[in-house]
Amino acid sequence: MTISWLPVDLPKFEYSKEVIEDFKQSETFMPLGSIFEALRLTTKTSENYGIENWRHDLTDSQCKLRDYINEHLPFEHLVNVKIHHPTKARSDNHFHYDFAFPEKNPELYEHNKNMEPCGYRLILQGNRTGELRLVNNDQIVIPTMPPTTDWYVLGHTNTEHSNIGHPVDRYIVFCHAWIDKDRHQELLECSLVKYKDYAVFS
């Protein structure tokens, strides 16, 4: 039995509203007519999931998010940290895996696969249930977030998922990284103790 989705036992991030306001004032990296807007907080020097650094032009709220992630998340090296905001509904069958192009970096793909679940996500704003759905054992599952954390982790290479309906008020921080195995395992274990009743297993 493996974990497909799990709330993470991390302290609340206190500056979500400020991060959203700065996002609204920023130019996005995807056009407004797209399915979602995305603001990348890390550099992009490679198209092949290369190791990246934090951008040097982050706002004050984004620097607070950077410092929080550096302190609390079990990352050895960053690949991509960005803010996602849906702008319109996706089709009912738009399910996907977050590691979209394994062939671009087979080494990282294998590393992430061995660390699953390792797709850390922060809900800056959005409903605690009903906006995310998973394909799990050939069934559609709608997970529920507990009120005590805004972080969850899902399978980055092996958990098919999609947004539901038109969640235009949803803002998510998407993290992709090389994982520190020991810190990651410790965080998963304590999160599972605290949030086992919320977990989705496959």
Image (cartoon, rainbow, N blue to C red):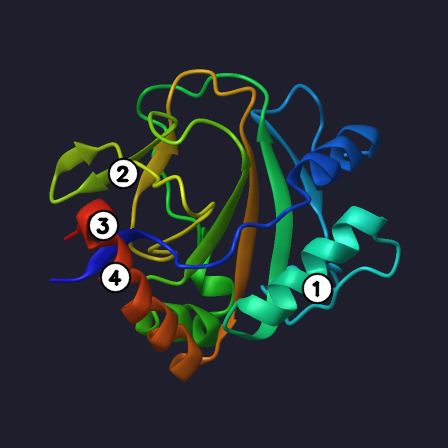
Q: Residue at x 55, y 49 (%)?
A: 174
Q: Is residue 93 visible?
A: yes
The residue beneath circle 1 is 67
What x and y, as percent, mark residue 111? Answer: 40, 75
CA–CA distance in space, label 4 to label 3: 7 Å
Q: Residue at x 40, y 69 (%)?
A: 112
What x and y, as percent, mark residue 66? Answer: 70, 60
What x and y, as percent, mark residue 91? Answer: 38, 19
CA–CA distance in space, label 4 to label 1: 25 Å
- How many neighbours does mark 1 have within 10 angstroms: few (below 14), some (14-19), or many (20 or more)? few
- How many neighbours does mark 2 have within 10 angstroms: few (below 14), some (14-19), or many (20 or more)? many
- Label 1 is placed on what type of residue? Asp
Mark 1 and 3 residues: CB-CB less than 8 Å, in contact?
A: no
Question: Which mark sits nearer the N-terminus, 4 or 3?
Answer: 4
The residue beneath circle 2 is 134
The residue beneath circle 3 is 199
Mark 2 and 4 residues: CB-CB less than 8 Å, in contact?
A: no
Mark 4 and 3 residues: CB-CB less than 8 Å, in contact?
A: yes
Q: Nearer the viewer, mark 2 or mark 4?
A: 4
Question: Which mark sits nearer the N-terminus, 1 or 3?
Answer: 1
